[in-house]
């Protein structure tokens, strides 16, 4: 005897795969990993996340309740929905269902009617309640056994509309195999406070939204509609929603209150254009009709045997039937196999369960595929916005290091200029050491700066003795950043502490970590002395140059003291422009000389390469961290900047500085930022949901 191979159940496989991958990282950027649901939330798809989680939870729970088959009965006001449900209940059950045209008799709550044996199994009853809770988001309320109390519960949604989303649940001895969902009408406008609770629902229609949720629970639907209202927009909206949520669940259209007249059965089942369009568009499993029993002669157009089944009934129910063309002209002879009551003997719970499972598969796949599409659209948006932000931020940082000629400025770094000054002395003529360096006057002046705002420095610093500093306060930098289109308005108030943190990190880094190989400085110094020619010029240059270096060193110390005192400042100056203004005959340099072998070319290159570019890179990388941007875009390609103008314009590549990142709580990570790509797990998941056909083998 061989063991039979377990039957492949697509829903189980899909749920297993989803649960296996839901917490694995599917996306990665330069500094972050996201799982599937996190990625969807980043893409502003919170509602889709909720739909996916609920769809999977309900499907998983439904697998455990495979033996419970529920038929949803939904339709328009006074179409006979509750009468259809009541016709299958026991006499005691019918007493609990208020029916009638008057508002006090109507159905104003959603009620699940289930076989009595479900109430006798405590575990099964708990499973059912859990399923309904997952489907509708709220625990169900039990329908009282007392007819008066039950009737009051049935109509309670009229005066207390907030109760409508909470389903009622009842058990009845008249039900053995199938259960029913008795729905209130979907066309009545609910109170504004109720509509506000279901934003994102179908047209803010809480009733239609409930039916859509119930579609994950019900194995089939009976849609009850009056003949005269078949063109109602809500009918198509309802059928569209059922098809969208549970595409494989069979739907039957029950046309009630048909006027009894010759040819009416043929007209509805074969000729009526509206009916045929509905049947084709929504793949309706069948069309049933019931005559309006308030119009004399209705029995002449209803199967005789069907009429006899209710001859002794205490109350009247709509009698639904269908038929083949051979019975169009002799409706009283239509056999029982065409009656609605017989449909439930023809329906096979196993097949309905399989169709329901298939619908769950299709819904989950549809939701997840939509999620993948939304994620990829978000990835594209992120790429575009990141590119814009990266470019804008690089230009912003570059402006802080460019003078009026777009030549690179230098940071007044005390360590760098002290080392460069030593190299100048070390590589200069023997008599350079004899020249005095006027630092005392510098000390006197920078002491005054500490108590003044940067805007007042020009009043203290003599222009002929001190370089023109480009000084930006934290507030000024924030003001420039506010003009950036890629920074959302809602983030502008948070810029100030972020800028302060960036500048503090930047100052600390370039002050302590900016180091240059002494050999490189010697090469700069040698080129400096080589560029000076003529004894008269040398005499003037030696004194001027060494004085200039002394001033810069003192000025750098002043700025350090001010920043250490709590100020948020970013400063830079053009060393070569100032140098040229103090050495007669020395023209202002441009980056165009770099690499040409011209005088001072190596010296200027060193200033840019060992001061400007490392400082600019450090500032840019810190701002990238602050806004959640990658330091390199595309990854592996270092950023480039341009200095100079016209024929002297030159491109430079920022060095890969090892700048410590900002603390996570000091960052201002912007929305829709990052260069995201699928991880290996993400690619597997994406491939699976696109290729999985969800069909049982």
Image: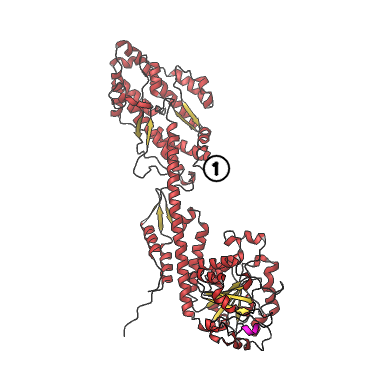
Give the residue number, with chain letter if any, for mark 1: 489
Outermost residue on the top side: it is 536
Q: How many marks?
A: 1
In percent of width and height, residue 85 lies at 61, 78
Q: Is residue 354 magenta?
A: no
Q: Is residue 301 magenta?
A: yes
Q: Is residue 110 above or below residue 37?
A: below
Magenta residues, as a range?
Answer: 294-302
* Residue nearer the viewer, 400 or 279: 279
**Residue drawn at x 50%, y 59% as measured from the top left:** 48
Which image quarter is the C terminus in?
A: bottom left
In percent of width and height, residue 565 lies at 51, 31
Q: Is residue 219 above or below residue 162?
A: below
Which image quarter is the N terminus in?
A: bottom left
**To which quarter of the image does residue 648 belong?**
top left
* Residue nearer the viewer, 505 or 57: 57
Please indicate, yes or no, whether residue 433 appears anywhere in the rendered image: yes
* Residue nearer the viewer, 600 or 694: 694
In percent of width and height, residue 203 lies at 59, 60
Crowding around mark 1 (Cα neighbors within 10 Å: few <14, some 14 to 19, many 20+) is few
SS for dot 1: helix
In percent of width and height, residue 592 lies at 33, 26
**Residue drawn at x 43%, y 68% as measured from the top left:** 15
Please indicate, yes or no, whether residue 419 appears anywhere in the rendered image: no
Visual colour scheme: secondary structure
**Residue drawn at x 39%, y 39% as measured from the top left:** 659
Left/right placement of residue 602 relative to residue 139 reads left
């Amino acid at each position: 005897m061989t063991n039979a191979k377990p039957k492949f159940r697509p829903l189980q496989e899909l749920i297993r795969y989803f649960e296996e991958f839901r917490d694995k990282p599917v996306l990665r950027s330069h500094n972050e990993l996201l799982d599937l649901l996190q990625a969807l939330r980043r893409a502003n798809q919170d509602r889709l996340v909720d739909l996916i989680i609920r769809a999977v939870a309900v499907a998983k729970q439904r697998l455990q309740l495979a033996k419970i088959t529920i038929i949803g009965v939904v339709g328009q006001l006074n179409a006979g929905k509750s009468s259809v449900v009541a016709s299958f209940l026991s006499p005691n059950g019918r007493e609990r269902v208020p029916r009638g045209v008057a508002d006090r008799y109507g159905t104003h709550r959603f009620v699940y009617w289930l076989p009595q044996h479900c109430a006798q199994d405590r575990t099964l009853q708990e499973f059912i309640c859990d399923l309904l809770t997952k489907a509708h988001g709220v625990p169900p309320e039990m329908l009282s056994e007392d007819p008066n109390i039950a009737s009051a519960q049935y109509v309670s949604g009229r005066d207390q509309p907030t109760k409508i989303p909470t389903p009622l649940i009842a058990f009845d001895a008249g039900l053995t195999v199938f259960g029913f969902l008795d729905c209130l009408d979907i066309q009545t406008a609910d109170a504004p406070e109720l509509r506000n609770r279901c934003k994102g629902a179908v047209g803010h229609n809480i009733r239609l939204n409930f039916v859509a949720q119930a579609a994950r629970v019900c194995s089939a639907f009976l849609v009850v509609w009056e003949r005269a209202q078949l063109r109602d927009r809500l009918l198509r909206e309802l059928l569209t929603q059922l098809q969208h949520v549970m595409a494989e669940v069979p739907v039957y259209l029950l046309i009630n209150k048909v006027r009894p007249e010759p040819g009416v059965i043929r007209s509805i089942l074969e000729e009526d254009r509206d009916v045929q369009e509905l049947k084709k568009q929504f793949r309706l499993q069948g069309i049933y009709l019931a005559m309006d029993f308030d119009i004399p002669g209705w029995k002449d157009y209803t199967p005789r045997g069907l009429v006899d089944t209710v001859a002794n009934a205490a109350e009247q129910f709509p009698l639904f039937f269908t038929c083949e063309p051979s019975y169009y002209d002799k409706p009283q002879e239509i056999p029982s196999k065409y009656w609605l009551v017989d449909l439930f003997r023809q329906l096979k719970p196993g097949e309905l369960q399989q169709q329901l499972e298939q619908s769950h598969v299709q819904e989950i796949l549809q939701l997840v595929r939509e999620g993948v599409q939304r994620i990829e659209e978000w990835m594209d948006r992120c790429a575009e916005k990141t590119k814009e932000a990266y470019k804008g931020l690089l230009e912003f940082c570059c402006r802080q290091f460019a003078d009026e000629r777009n030549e690179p400025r230098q940071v007044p770094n005390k360590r760098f200029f002290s080392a460069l000054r030593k190299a100048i002395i070390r590589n200069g003529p023997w008599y350079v050491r004899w020249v005095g360096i006027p630092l005392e006057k510098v000390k006197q002046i920078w002491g005054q700066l500490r108590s003044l705002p940067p805007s007042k420095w020009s009043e203290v610093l003599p222009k002929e003795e001190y370089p023109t500093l480009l000084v930006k306060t934290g507030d000024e930098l924030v003001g420039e950043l506010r003009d950036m289109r890629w920074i959302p308005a809602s983030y502008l108030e948070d810029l100030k502490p972020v800028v302060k943190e960036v500048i503090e990190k930047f100052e600390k880094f370039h002050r302590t970590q900016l180091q240059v190989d002494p050999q490189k400085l010697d090469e700069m110094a040698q080129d400096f002395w080589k560029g000076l020619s003529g004894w008269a010029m040398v005499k003037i240059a030696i004194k001027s140059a060494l004085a200039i270096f002394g001033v810069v060193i003192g000025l750098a110390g002043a700025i350090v003291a001010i920043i250490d005192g709590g100020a948020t400042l970013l400063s830079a100056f053009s060393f070569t422009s100032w140098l040229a203004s103090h050495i007669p005959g020395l023209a202002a340099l441009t980056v165009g000389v770099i690499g040409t072998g011209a005088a001072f070319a190596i010296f200027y290159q060193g200033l840019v390469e060992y001061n400007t570019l490392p400082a600019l890179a450090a500032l840019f990388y810190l701002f990238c961290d602050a806004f959640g941007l990658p330091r390199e875009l595309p990854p592996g390609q270092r950023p480039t900047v341009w200095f100079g103008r016209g024929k002297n314009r030159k491109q430079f590549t920022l060095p890969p500085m090892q700048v410590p990142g900002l603390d996570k709580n000091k960052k201002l990570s912007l929305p829709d930022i990052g260069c995201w790509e699928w991880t290996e797990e993400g690619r597997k998941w994406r491939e699976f949901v696109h290729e999985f056909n969800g069909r049982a083998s």
